[in-house]
Amino acid sequence: MLKEKRILLGVTGSIAAYKAVELLRELTKRGAEVQVVMTEAATKFVAPLTFETLSRQPVLLDMFTLAYGSHIGHIEATARADLFVIAPATARTIARLALGLADDFLSCIYLASRCPILVAPAMDSDMYQHVAVQENLSRLRDRGVHIVGPASGELASGSVGPGRLVEPPEIVEAIERILVTARDLADEVVLVTAGPTREPLDPVRYLSNRSSGKMGYAMAEAAAARGARVILVSGPTALSPPQGVDVIHVETAQQMHDAVLAKLTAATVVIKAAAVADYRPKQVAARKIKKDEAVREVTLESTPDILAEVGKRKGRRILVGFAAETEDLVENARKKLQRKNLDLMVANDVSQPGAGFDADTNAVKILDAQGKVEELPVQSKRSVADRVLDRVVGLLKQRG
């Protein structure tokens, strides 16, 4: 899929730099022409000779050397590239990119680049979660830079949390999405819901669930990458909206219901990935309930069933639902698919490792109206999103 694609691979001073060697091997196996650019710190972890041997290209190190004969190195390097990948990208490198510094070869190439850019962060968990790093990543996303990862797990410090460089196969998936994704949804308007809803008990407290919104946001990002106009109706999340997506922020199930129905006429595909609260308090206190006046009972009432309502109005739209279950996965998902007039149901057992709430991965079963079940193993939520959209594209073609 990457045959004859020219990729610049930036490697920075992280303990994860050894994974860049495997990434280089994976890219060359797929036919890509890869040239590596290293920061000085990166050479402390992996010798440039390793990359030169595997890529059969000189490693770019010195911004004061004319690496392309009489041509200026950082200008010529990016002029030849289809994609610039920085993996691993340290907190320092991310900050330099966000600030637009140009004090080494890698940062000069970034500023000179007119090709797409993909950044794969790698650092300790506390560093990654620092507000400065998050602001820098958000700034890069706003400029159109693609971000993949990081993953969660055991780190070099011995702590456990987000910050691990994602594995090379996942980076390759992201590269392929950027370089070879078909624009097969270019004529479609895709309406996606994501995240939880919050149902207030008083001005301070609410009922909600553990949804992070990551699956819905991955669906929106994937649909936009395939050329669709995407409308994302999002409950409260900590996620940055995908680039180029129209976002409507809501909080309660009623607000999400109203937003979805207001945009339904324009939509040709509806993907309901939100975890909408099934119940809400019947009475909402006007002021904070004090501890000494504890509520002994909370009377609940049903929230609007958005998916069922859209199913009644579906027409020729493609309608996809999501079901998070803890038992009888296929049976419960099939009943929901039939009851709500869906074309596809994406079901996952949230009690299984890698498929629960707030994870970066998912493992799902895709059910269709003809009774077929497709099982997908644990993989990134973005990969799951593309597989679901493959099925959506197939249904659109069937309907002409």
Image (tube, rainbow, N blue to C red):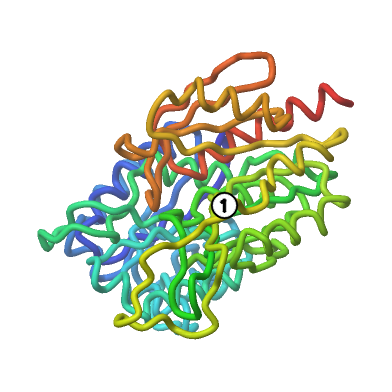
Q: Name the residue under label 1.
A: 276
In the image, 372 versus 339, the foreground residue is 339
Residue 153 percent coordinates (x, y):
23, 52
Q: In which quarter of the image is residue 345?
A: top right
Residue 293 percent coordinates (x, y):
35, 80
Q: In which quarter of the image is residue 13?
A: bottom left
Looking at the image, residue 120 lies above or below residue 338: below
In the image, 369 versus 117, the foreground residue is 369
In the image, 278 versus 28, the foreground residue is 278
Residue at 71% from the left image edge and 56% from the top image edge: 257
Q: Is any part of residue 76 visible from this angle? A: no
Residue at 70% from the left image edge and 45% from the top image edge: 226
Instruction: Please give left or right for residue 328 compared with residue 231 in the image.
Output: left
Residue at 43% from the left image edge and 39% from the top image edge: 27
Looking at the image, residue 137 lies above or below residue 146: below
The C terminus sits in image quarter: top right
